[in-house]
Image (cartoon, rainbow, N blue to C red):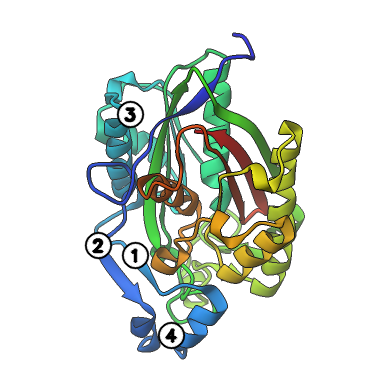
Amino acid sequence: MSEDRKVGILGLGSYLPELGSYLPEKILTNKDLEKMVDTTDDWIMERTGIKERRIARADEATSDMATEAAKRALADAKLKPEDLDLIIVATITPDMFFPATACLVQQKIGARQVPAFDISVACSGFIYGIAIANQFIKSGTYKHALVVAAEKLSAVTDWQDRSTCVLFGDGAGAAVLGPVEKGGILSVYLGADGRQGELIKMPAGGSRIPATHKSVDERLHFIKMNGTELFRHAVKIMADAALQATQPLGLKAEDLSLVIPHQANIRILNAVAKRMGLSTDKIYLNISKYGNMSAASSAVALVEAVKEGRIKKGDKILLDAFGGGLTWGAMVIEW
């Protein structure tokens, strides 16, 4: 198929039920956390910019949230599950190691027996998923793809660790991709550095440290993070990724209508904006409401930016994310 084939987002959602992102009902505020660990609302806000986060129910798994997001994204795209040719779920909190969460979503939405698989690239997952789907559609292999980013981070958060438990929340967002006549995905830049994988990880539960009484007692099935080093890497890499995605198009910061960064930490985002020479009004932020939802953060932020009218037809926007692995990605989309 011709390289001139354009691929864009046909359907997104929003926080609203009739569209396409899904967020749990339970809200965990900083005041709630003050009762759980030695922290304060002021400290959390100053260091992270987070005021509250959503927490999934005990009986609510990642595939449940992903399914809700998928259904709403399909409705927004005015497509049916049987129109899909590919399903990708980006998550580091799958229902189980196998089968893939994407297969569970396929069954729950009633899609055909199309390819379905998960990708595990942490906070960069939504951008990686769109990049993969873009290639399949651009080549003519498939016509419509569903990309879902869903996380139940509350299940792997150590609620006794005040340095990490203030950061994370649960949620899901989805996008349906397909051919478009104008605009669409203009550029993609992806990267990874496994040498820095130790900076954020969940040590146990895999083949290296299988689940045992000892691993559970040592709290190795929770997120462990070196926040200081992550901050240093995140600012540099996200700013560089933005340049790598925009420069081939001849775009400068002022040419972008909106930048939607991964919602990790307000200090990181402010530093990235400064490094890029961007005014704060061009950076979309919803971190105060939801915290860091890993792969779901970029998806939900994009959904809400569209819902709020921050993105209009013809706008060029930048998605920019950085996550465990280490992984990163940036993407320019013309709406």
Location of residue 95 with respect to 77 vertically, above or below:
below
In 3D space, how far apart are the residues under numbered discs 3 and 1 (Cα atoms)?
A: 26 Å
Residue 41 is tagged as 4
Q: Earlier in the sequence, mark 2 or mark 1?
A: 2
What residue sits right under mark 2 in the picture?
Answer: 25
Q: Which residue is drawn at 66% across and 50% down?
A: 327
102 or 315, nearer to the observer: 315
Secondary structure of residue under mark 4: helix
Q: Is the C-beta separation of discs 2 and 1 under 8 Å?
A: yes
| Mark 1 burial class by Cα count in 10 Å: few <14, some 14-19, many 20+ | many
Left or right of 267: which side holds 116? left
Q: Between tags 3 and 1, which lies in front?
A: 3
Q: Residue at x 28, y 59 (%)?
A: 24
Amino acid type indicated by mark 3: Ala
What residue sits right under mark 1 in the picture?
Answer: 54
In 3D space, how far apart are the residues under numbered discs 2 and 3 (Cα atoms)?
A: 25 Å
Residue 330 x %, y %: 63, 43
In 3D space, how far apart are the residues under numbered discs 4 and 3 (Cα atoms)?
A: 40 Å
Amino acid type indicated by mark 2: Glu
Secondary structure of residue under mark 1: strand
Q: Is the C-beta separation of discs 4 and 1 under 8 Å?
A: no
Left or right of 150: which side holds 260? right
| Mark 3 burial class by Cα count in 10 Å: few <14, some 14-19, many 20+ | many
